[in-house]
Amino acid sequence: MTEASYLREKLESISPTERVERIVVQRFAVPLLQALGFDESEIREEFETGCGQVDLAARKNVDPEDIFLRSPKNPYLLLEAKSRAVNLREGSYYRDAVCQIESYLLAKNCKSAKWGIITNANNIQLWRKHGKVVHPATANLDISSDNIESIVRNLRDKIENYERALTVCMYNNKGGVGKTTTVINLAATLATKRKKVLVVDFDSQGDLTRSLEATPGKITLTQCLKDPKIDVHAIVQTYKLKGFSIFDIIPRDPELETLTDSRAVAYIPKGTRRLRDLIAPLRNEYDYILIDCPTQWLYFSQSGVFAADVILIPTRPDDLSSLNNAARVITSFVPETARSRQDGGPIALPTFFNGVSSGSEYTIRLAHEEIQKLINQEKSVDLRPYFWPHFKKGNENKSIFRIPDYAVISSAKFARIPAVFKDRRVLEYYQSLAREYFIDE
């Protein structure tokens, strides 16, 4: 009997109304990990994460002197199980389970963990950790005897082939919030942390390309979009400063502007899905792929969001419409894209304030009042974690990450140099941004 067949047999042995979590762990979760390639000595129950015990943890034994069952440290995968009486398809129990696996993956004893699974033997979802980001690697899947083997094959393929890059789209459908500036300075900051970064200028106006004095080569981004046979590596360039390579860039080319016409977009294979396919061969060559796209929710921005794992949304406290538009991205555009992709992604990260001027506390207070209105008005999505990520019961922390408004940030565009290389204070703020969202230090 194969491991997958054994798992199916165990699944069928669990009552559809089973209310005991332990039975789900023993009869389904443990055989599931074995079907995913872990043997009994590589699985540990009730692993102490540092913020509570996760039901199961697993890691391959690469050293005969370091058996995970006997020496439970440096886990690779965590699994949190629930009873079948707990609804993990949707609703508050599902959201609680997601928060639980995320907190475990980010806990102090799980720095090495890359994957998390939540399941109740009715539903299952795989989550991936990249630095401080935890995002879906699959949709929340319904389990049956008929599909459990295909689910196992899909999960095992992902777990055994961890992709190096996190793809981030910088987006708000409100202009003037500093999307391009943030992409450039975040890319440069991540490079100072020895991360290999690729920046994609997917805006027909090409502000990012001009800011870095990049020029397209003989083969262009537009040509690659239209012809899947072209190797994407042919359009990747390197941004250098004083002879040193900083990060790579796919520059905008003039022909890209023709794609503002929907009739021209019709000639792009797979339409808004094409950019995701285009950068797929690069996902094991970089630590981060950052996509800059325009404001309007049309081909370019739809493609950028579709291609991303996560969406980072800049706002301004002195522009209340940027907060309203951020809420629209979170409640409408991101879910719309996730329904189209059907693989669990993308998800939105918490928003942040860009260009905060000194003495703006009154403006920030008004911004918080507007956020509270948005939270109260929105019924389908809980907006609080996206605007106030540190807000918890008993600790009403409404802090929002801020990037100050420094003149050097704006002037750096004319110098064709990322502002983080012109001013130490600016670098420190963008390092804080990287630590807040991406880098686990």
Image: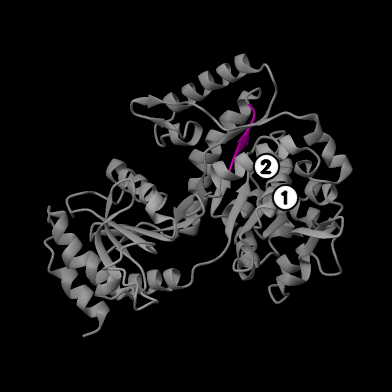
Which residue corresponds to mark 1? 188
**Mark 2: secondary structure:** loop
Q: Mark on residue 296?
A: 2
- Residue 358's spot in the image, x, y percent? 69, 20
Q: Residue at x 22, y 74 (%)?
A: 7
Left or right: 352, with 49 as reference point: right
**10 Å neighbourhood of mark 1: few (<14), some, or many (≥20)?**
many
- Residue 90's spot in the image, x, y percent? 31, 47
Which residues, given as a range, are shown in magenta? 312-316
**Mark 1: secondary structure:** helix
For badge 2, the amino acid type reads: Gln
Q: Residue at x 24, y 49 (%)?
A: 87
Q: Which of marks 1 and 2 is nearer the N terminus?
A: 1
Q: Which residue lies furthest to the front in this view?
A: 65
Real-space CA distance between mark 1 and mark 2, rounded to the nearest whole angstrom: 26 Å
Left or right: 140, with 321 as reference point: left
Left or right: 239, with 282 as reference point: right
Can you see residue 146?
Answer: no
Q: Residue at x 75, y 51 (%)?
A: 260
**Residue 315 lies within the magenta run:** yes
For badge 1, the amino acid type reads: Ala
